[in-house]
Amino acid sequence: MKNKWIKKYIALALSAVMIAGSVSVISEVRANAQENGEGTEGNATENTDTGISVQVIVENLTYPQWDGAAWDGELFDVNVDVAEGTTVKEALAAACDEAEVEAEEAGIAEGDGEESNEVNYSATIADSAYGAYVSAIGGLAAGDGGQSAGWIYSVNGTEAEVGIDDYTLQDEDVVIFDYTCAYTQDADGSWVSDVSKINKDLSADDVQDALDALDEVEDLDEIKAGLANVKALYETLAPIYDDDGFLADEIETFEFYLKLKEKPEIANLTATYTDGVVELSWDQAEGASGYFIDYEIYEDDELWMDGEINELIEDTSYTWDMPAVIGEEIGVRPGHVYSADLTVYAMNTDDLESYYEALYGDEDEGDDSDYGEDDSDYDDDTDGGDDSDEIDYELLSQILVACPTTVSYEMPGVGEQIGKVRIKTTSCTYTGAVKKATVMMVYDTYGFGICDWDEDLNGGSYYTVSYSAASPKAVGTYKAIVTGQNGLSGSAYASYKILPVKTAISSLAKGTKSFTVKWTKKSTQVTGYQIQYSLYKDFRSYKLATVTSYKTTSRTIKSLKSKKYYYVRVRTYKKVNGKAYYSGWSATKYVKTK
């Protein structure tokens, strides 16, 4: 689909939906377990010489409790020991008794948190010209889910064609009772489930595939026709499959898309890309008081990253310094081609609050706006009872006064050559050990961060790091030199310093208009000391005294003011090739002169 912004709303809509499970084809449920004669772990029973063991499962996968069912999901799954020649009817009765005993022993109720006295495990059997059949289990009766709702059963994955009193079970048989909302009578008079018939030709995947196909369609009439087909498929599927709103939300999103496409696009939207900076301009949209922009960046035509420019733009132009905003996040890779799509949204709002409210609900206003990377705006609600996190398409339709319009541009030269290097720290303290810089990020010439590791390189890198000295450990200045490889050209360096070790004041004594300070001697990689003193605690005005020999460890400062507090601190320094390198200051101490 040319207008890729629709995928944003699809992603947002589906993020608020948790799928309860995949499509259940009644005739295939637990097929593997049945073929292997496997029971439920923890319920297995040992067969005896005079009887057989069968597994009985009762479940309702088509009529949700929120729609009025007494219960949904699995009511019970038990193994029972019965006599040879036992019918399905007799096995069901034994299984109901066993399930009730197990529930009472566990002290909990079956089902979705219902009280135990609201769930029963009894089965109601009725007779017909075609044999006995189940009319209700656990209070869920035929007809509760609609005119065509009722109970069917299968043995070892095959739907039975006789009444439950006419089917004789064998050892390790698996019997499944399923509640269906699509139960009809064939021409020959036998009762069958339309669920298996429908699912032979239709599943949720078919509906999803039809929806996905619309992504590639640009013609509006074709989209409308395709959407009508999708809705027809969905309406056929809906009675037998509760998808928790998953497909319904996608359909609603496409209907919203069509509604927006009927609005005029933003005219004359252009983008000029130069060295990482994008200049955007467009015509004023009727009724718009502000504009919002999101972006998608592609690597070799594959989506690489996306996000939003989280501000409301009141003008009809915008300058976006891409490296300054997403330079490190993008992590470009040499040898790949990059391009971008920017989509502009015209809004009749003075701030983004109402827009984010429509997307995320009342509580979230889009503080974490990068919907593609941060899901903190989403409420992972699975109970289906709180709709506050659903997209308000009606409100969005009112806010967006024009069809979101996209402009594309190429980003030539990205990731080809090293531009600069950033290291973790630019100074460290002498310890006698080799000190090497930690490279935090290498940038290309436009300011985009280079990916520091790529699985395509089998654990390798796009650059190597060397140093201006073989063993950088003495006080001085060094360079961490980054050189490109594996498709990255050029080199750059970052400088860092190794500074002398700090000292500490050992005593500070007052004198008449003077004080005497003593400090700890430091002899390795130290030339001398510097004393700083001030009448102010923050040293906003101060004087310095320099001690040129590391062997000297005291100094008396004279010609001071009488009866004044002085704040004092000391540091070491080392001269290397005429340049002084200073340590950090010692802790500050103070003294009052006489």
Image (cartoon, rainbow, N blue to C red):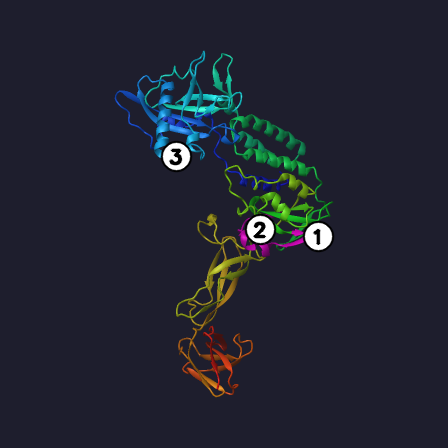
Residue closest to the eye, 590 or 250: 590
Nearer to us of marks 3 and 2 is 3
Q: Position of residue 375 (x, y in %)?
A: 53, 46
Judging by the rendered image, the residue that carries numbered circle 2 is: 367
Judging by the rendered image, the residue that carries numbered circle 1 is: 315
Q: CA distance from mark 1 to mark 3?
A: 63 Å
User: Are the residues flagged by discs 1 and 3 in contact, CB closer than 8 Å?
Assistant: no
Q: Position of residue 233 (x, y in %)?
A: 57, 27
Judging by the rendered image, the residue that carries numbered circle 3 is: 108
What is the three-letter code of the residue carrying label 2?
Asp
1 or 3: tag closer to the N-terminus = 3
Quarter where residue 517 is shown:
bottom left
Q: Secondary structure at mark 2?
A: loop
Highlighted range, magenta? 312-341
Nearer to us of marks 2 and 1 is 2
What is the three-letter code of the residue carrying label 1?
Asp
Q: Secondary structure at mark 1?
A: loop
Total tally of numbered discs in the picture: 3
3 or 2: tag closer to the N-terminus = 3
101 part of magenta stretch: no
